[in-house]
Image: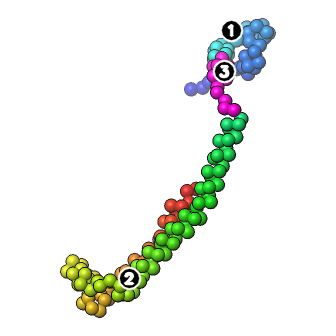
Amino acid sequence: MKRNECEREVEVLDAICTGRWPETCDAELRAHVAACATCRDVPALATGLRAERAEAWQRAVVPSSGLVWWRAEMRARQERAARAARPITLVHVLAIVGCFAAAVGIAALGVPLVPVGAWLSSLGDWLPSLAMGDAADGMPLLRPVILVAIGAWLVLAPIVVYFVVVRD
């Protein structure tokens, strides 16, 4: 749908916005508005919008400058605290990851801290693919599986921690 435009529409809007419509503007502009189909609706719409703006301006509640300043300071303080806590959180997570990796590595290398021979032999009934050999020789297939799992975990854990800690 093509909109009809009038070159005097800007003049009508200027007269309304400056408060000259209709009393103090020239008679030729008033006659044009009465005759032009495009400009006929402009005064009604523009004066309505101008009155709505004035009413909204009166209803607006603007906080004091001190309150705005205080809120900005509080927000900046909270952002600085969050930014300062990020490396500490990262160090805690990496320490937990390292402790867990050390514990799993020690267990995987076969340090006999826990008697697991009976448990591994009963596991052989449930997982025959892992129970190659008897419990006394340490189940040769289980150790590489655990080491691969530890390696994958050590590679993926810092990536996961990075995406959890960095929120930007």
Q: Are marks 2 and 1 in contact (CB under 8 Å)?
A: no
- Numbered tag placed on residue 23 in the rendering: none
Q: Is residue 137 left or right of residue 159?
A: left
Q: Which residue extends farthest left?
A: 125
- Of the residues tagged 2 and 1, which is closer to the observer? 2
Residue 14: image location, x then y, percent = 75, 20
Type of amino acid at the residue the image marks with label 1: Ala
Q: Identify the secondary structure beneath mark 3.
A: helix
Stretch in magenta: 49-64
- Of the residues tagged 3 and 2, which is closer to the observer? 2
Residue occupied by mark 2: 107
- Numbered tag placed on residue 58 in the rendering: 3
Q: Nearer the viewer, residue 76 or 28?
A: 76
Instruction: Identify the image quadrant of residue 43.
Output: top right
- Of the residues tagged 3 and 1, which is closer to the observer? 3
Verify whether residue 52 appears in magenta: yes
Q: Quadrant of the C terminus?
A: bottom right
Residue 38: image location, x then y, percent = 65, 17
* Residue at image point 27% right, 91% down: 136
- Crowding at label 1, few (<14), some or many (≥20) Cα neighbours within 10 Å? few
* Residue at image point 51% right, 68% down: 93
* Residue at image point 29% right, 83% down: 116
- Numbered tag placed on residue 34 in the rendering: 1
